[in-house]
Amino acid sequence: MKKKMQDSTLKGWLYLLPAIVFLGFFMVYPLIDVLIYSFEEGYNFASQTYFGTGTYNYSYILHDPYFLQAVKNTLILVAVTVPLSTGIALLISVGLNSITALRSLLQTIYFLPYVTNTLAVGLVFMILFKKTAYSDGLVNLLINWFGGSSVDFIEGPYWAKMFVLCFYTIWIVMPFKILILTSALASINQDYYHAARVDGTSKFRIFRRITLPMIAPMIFYLIITGFIGAFKAYSDAVALFGTDLNAAEMNTIVGYVYDMLYGDSGGYPSYASAAAVILFVIVLTITCINLLISKKKIH
Amino acid sequence: MKSNLDYIKIEKETRIRRRTVRALTYIFLVFWAAVVLFPFYWMVLSSLKSYGAYNSEYIPKFFTLSPTLENYAEAFTAVPLGQYFLNTIIFTAVTTALMLAVITLAAFAFARLEFRGKNIFFLLFLSLMMIPNELVVITNFVTITNWDMRNTFPGLILPSVTSVFYIYLLKENFEQIPDSLYYAAKVDGTSDWKYLWRVMIPMSRPTIITITILKVIECWNSYIWPRLITDDEKYFLVSNGIQEIRENGFGRENIPAMMAAVVVISVPLVILFLIFHKKIMAGVSRGGTKG
């Protein structure tokens, strides 16, 4: 019996071996390593030497105007897109839930952005919003129709660029939210609604007193994943404004990490690591706060 | 008589109100569908306009009377779009296949085999799900560079062949297969390996297909890692290719050709989606995240 147990132990670890090797090399080791990097001062990528340990990397990036710009952009992006996208997704899902005709067709259409290449469709958005010498672009055409004057959304003022970035981000994250909310709405027990209708409760009250509490856990889930996703925004910005995000004033925290690591401004893995650790701490804190709030509110 | 009239009036009013709400709902829903679809329409439309026609439209037209395919020819000849495509197909196929092998073995061990340390190890394993990719990418970049694997397929593929989340998903699925089947197989002298192949994998096919589709989407759209690890055009994936086209290709102003490239890159996933949309949506609502 004992022998058999040992046999199975060896076999168990053998089956796990590939996963352990890959995760060890590309996840566990990097996790420790990134912390070490972030405290090594003056790390030289070519010779792989450094001349001290300390918090200099952190203080450097916290005083780097590009990093502060990136933090500001990311915070605006999070503050605008998370509530807006969740709110609109909720409206759409409630609307979808109340109709029967066209429902599955619309559902399928809404999901389409999920499967598209962020970089590729970003290019289309850029063309729709861009003002060039030979054309003001389609969005400006619409603005002109309503009596406004043209704005260059891609290389123009800061607020215009931020608007496009937020708009594109919302467009991209919407499918996931609509999908989660429609399935949450569909799974609510219909008896509650029948009972409320018999009592003559108004529609708005039904929504506030029955629908919202029932799907509250899913909304919180979406807010948490939304926060995390928006804090990690990067590809959408690249798609709209190109790879030199610092010049466009549109960099994000993740973009800053990659710029420090690689590219024209790259070669500083220590700074990149410090920025990545800061990002991780921010995301972790927000997740914890969200979890605490949701626990209090739901129970 | 009067109260009867009131009743009819009230009924009429409610009916009108209900109709208005319904109409507004439909208008809102169709409006959002238009917002979603419009970029796709615009990219196909622009890709069909000739270079001259596109650039002479100061006010862009919403349709074209003389569609042309010359941009598609341009997209494949002026930049190595075919090469990007091939690279992405190789990358996607190999990554997905390797990942399926790795996660199936691991999920089998967690779900079916009994061995010492399993439960504690599984907890440790789950905690890895919290680690964002951004945190480990820096060291991975250094590792792959040190191994001299930049601009190679192994360098592109190796870091993304495991997924803690998919192992978890598959393990949950494996555990739903009744134990009695396993004991029956054991009595018949079937080895664990054979049992995995003959019973567990076929019975979990829906989950495996879902995981495969989600991974294919992820691979097809991956941008950050390939950008870090390749600077040789010969190894660009479609996302990097698009970025390259945007920054250097076609002469910056040839937007119709650019749009043709965007259409070509988007089509495979859209087709995949149209075929499997139910599976994909079910899979994503069970465990995909994006956004």
Image (spheres, coloured by chain):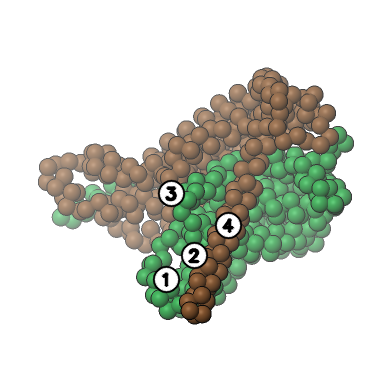
Q: Percent position (x, y) of residue A87? A: 60, 63
Q: Label 4 neighbourhood size at 10 Å, few (<14), some (14-19), many (20+)? A: few
Q: Under tag 3, what secondary structure? A: helix
Residue under circle 4?
Answer: B23
- Looking at the picture, how far across and down is residue B28, in whole percent? 61, 55
Would you identify the image quadrant in which residue B116 lies? bottom left
Q: Earlier in the sequence, mark 4 or mark 3?
A: 4
Q: Amino acid at mark 2?
A: Met
Q: Nearer the viewer, residue B189 or B222?
A: B222
> Which quadrant is home to the N terminus of chain A?
bottom left
B162 vs A271: above or below: above
Relative depth, front residue between B111 and A212? A212
Residues at discs 3 and 2 both on one chain: no
B124 left or right of B175 in image:
right
Q: Are marks 2 and 1 on the same chain?
A: yes
Could you tell me if residue A277 is visible in this image?
no
The residue pinned by badge 3 equals: B283
Determine if marks 4 and 1 fall on one subunit: no
Contact between marks 3 and 2 (CB within 8 A): the answer is no
For chain B, the rendered hue is: brown
- For disc 2, the marked residue is A218
Q: Which chain is green?
A: A
Judged left or right of residue A130, residue B8 is left
Disc assigned to residue A253: none
Report the residue marked by disc 1.
A193
Q: Is label 2 in a helix, a strand or a loop?
A: helix
- Residue at position x 33%, y 42% in the image: B205
Which three-letter amino acid code belongs to the residue tagged 1?
Answer: Tyr
Q: Residue reaching furthest left?
A: B187
